[in-house]
Amino acid sequence: MIGQGVLRECLLDSGVRRVVTVVRRPTGRNHSKLTELVRPDLTILAPLAQQLTGFDACLFCLGVSALGMTEEQYTSVTYDLTLSIAKTVLRTSPNVTFIYVSGAGTDSSERGRAMWARVKGRTENALLSMPFKAAYMFRPGAIIPLHGIRSSTGWYNAMYAVLKPLYPLLNRIAPTMFTTTEQLGRAMISVARNGYERHVLETVDINRL
């Protein structure tokens, strides 16, 4: 869902010259500046190395819910896979800005009670220690999908169907808790282009950008 939103904003932004997506399944999108690389197994990106060179930014939107997963399983997808891809990108585009979508409540200490928050915190800390041109961690709270974008998780869509009509009210009541796929995508492009004063961005930073 986040990837769809970010892709939409990249394709609409006249300052973005070229977009290459690395995806597990075809998105069905066609655009003159879009190249789509379908790779069902994202743990092996070596065959794509020649196509991942010369980029200004990597907008990393892959993620899974921790619901029903053990810490080992969640770590495999959230930490191991992310770091594997980040290392590949760093080799192929060493001057890249890396932007990682984490989540509100992520635990930078890596010692909290919430398993997902510890793993996300460990992932953030590892990315921030890597020699990218710059690295930024985005921690959105609730994300409202716009423009026909849908989550691949059924119960998310049911929840969003209820929340979406209430978004204007919720945004006034709790502006630091909610953002949209459009705002998130635009904020990521802004940070990739201009940087930001902090390397960990909460919802209030995302909406301000």
Image (cartoon, rainbow, N blue to C red):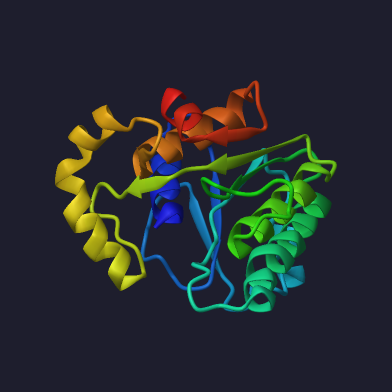
In this image, 155 relative to 44: left or right? left
In this image, 148 relative to 58: left or right? left
Query: Which residue lies at the image location 85% right of the left edge and 41% below the top edge?
Result: 131
Quarter of the picture containing the N terminus is: bottom left
Query: Which residue lies at the image location 36% right of the left edge and 69% below the top edge?
Result: 152
Query: Which residue lies at the image location 52% right of the left edge and 57% below the top edge?
Result: 35
Residue 20's x, y, as percent? 56, 53
Residue 155's x, y, as percent? 29, 69
Of 129 and 34, the residue lying toward us:
129
Residue 202's x, y, as percent? 52, 35
Whether residue 16 is visible to the viewer of this picture, yes or no, is no
Residue 18, picture quadrant:
top right
Please tell me whether residue 72 is drawn above or below residue 175 in the rendered image: below
Of 68 and 80, the residue lying toward us:
68
Residue 27, picture quadrant:
bottom left
Query: Which residue lies at the image location 36% right of the left edge and 66% below the top edge?
Result: 28
